């Protein structure tokens, strides 16, 4: 699949079929992630591949707890209808964990220590596009308490859980979502 086709056709998948994902495809997706750019080539990411249903159930329970908290804090009524079942459905969930010590020169800047997070975001985008190219669905998920996810996945306290990426065969084609025209998002300085 052409890269532009993958970019334009990728959608967040929140409903997965109950079929396993070939291990070779997961390896290919992780290889794509590992080729992402990073400050000073620090490659600040680690990947935890979760297929155990009991761990996915724990992650789901934590996300439900966070959802209830967010509803209480924000008052956003729409959150009631935001379903989280895909966390249990997805055959594979990959935790992307960043190392704050592997950031760039930003560590010396006033608002520093974000380079490692941005590098992990680039790795996640590579994963999403690789999944799309392999005819798999995926979704980037961040609705969890980092401390609780550390406990669930035994992540050391000096590392940062950045995201969960759910991967599997879509149960149905995710709907297209509108995008703002690029001319409304762009400023040129000539």
Image: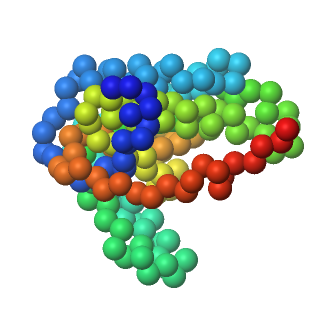
Left or right of residue 73, residue 126 in this image: left
Q: Position of residue 41 (x, y in %)?
A: 65, 17
Extreme residue in the left direction: 19
Q: Which residue is drawn at the image coordinates 20% and 32% (left, top)?
A: 21
Left or right of residue 113, residue 147 in this image: left
Vertical placement of 112 versus 105: above or below?
A: below
Vertical placement of 69 versus 165: above or below?
A: below
| Residue 127 picture quarter | top left
Vertical placement of 84 versus 106: above or below?
A: below
Q: Which residue is drawn at the image coordinates 29% and 42% (left, top)?
A: 137
Give 181 or 23, whichever is nearer the viewer.
181
| Residue 153 visible in the picture | no
Give 125 or 115, whichever is nearer the viewer.
125
Q: Position of residue 99 (x, y in %)?
A: 61, 31
Q: Position of residue 108 (x, y in %)?
A: 85, 33
| Residue 67 picture quarter | bottom left
């Amino acid at each position: 699949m052409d890269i532009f086709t993958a970019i334009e056709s990728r959608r967040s998948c929140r409903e997965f079929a109950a079929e396993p994902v070939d291990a070779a495809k997961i390896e290919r997706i992780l290889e794509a992630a590992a080729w992402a750019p990073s400050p000073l080539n620090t490659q600040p990411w680690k990947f935890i591949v979760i297929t155990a249903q009991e761990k996915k159930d724990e992650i789901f329970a934590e996300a439900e707890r966070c959802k209830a908290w967010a509803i209480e804090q924000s008052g956003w009524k729409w959150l009631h209808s935001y379903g989280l079942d895909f966390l249990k459905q997805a055959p594979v969930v990959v935790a992307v964990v960043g190392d704050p010590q592997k950031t760039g020169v930003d560590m010396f800047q006033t608002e520093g220590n974000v380079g490692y997070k941005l590098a992990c975001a680039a790795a996640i985008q590579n994963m999403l596009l690789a999944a799309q190219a392999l005819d798999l669905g995926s979704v980037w998920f961040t609705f969890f308490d980092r401390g609780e996810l550390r406990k669930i996945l035994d992540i050391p306290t000096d590392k940062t859980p950045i995201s969960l990426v759910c991967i599997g065969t879509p149960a149905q084609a995710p709907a297209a979502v509108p995008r703002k025209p690029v001319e409304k998002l762009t400023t040129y300085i000539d």
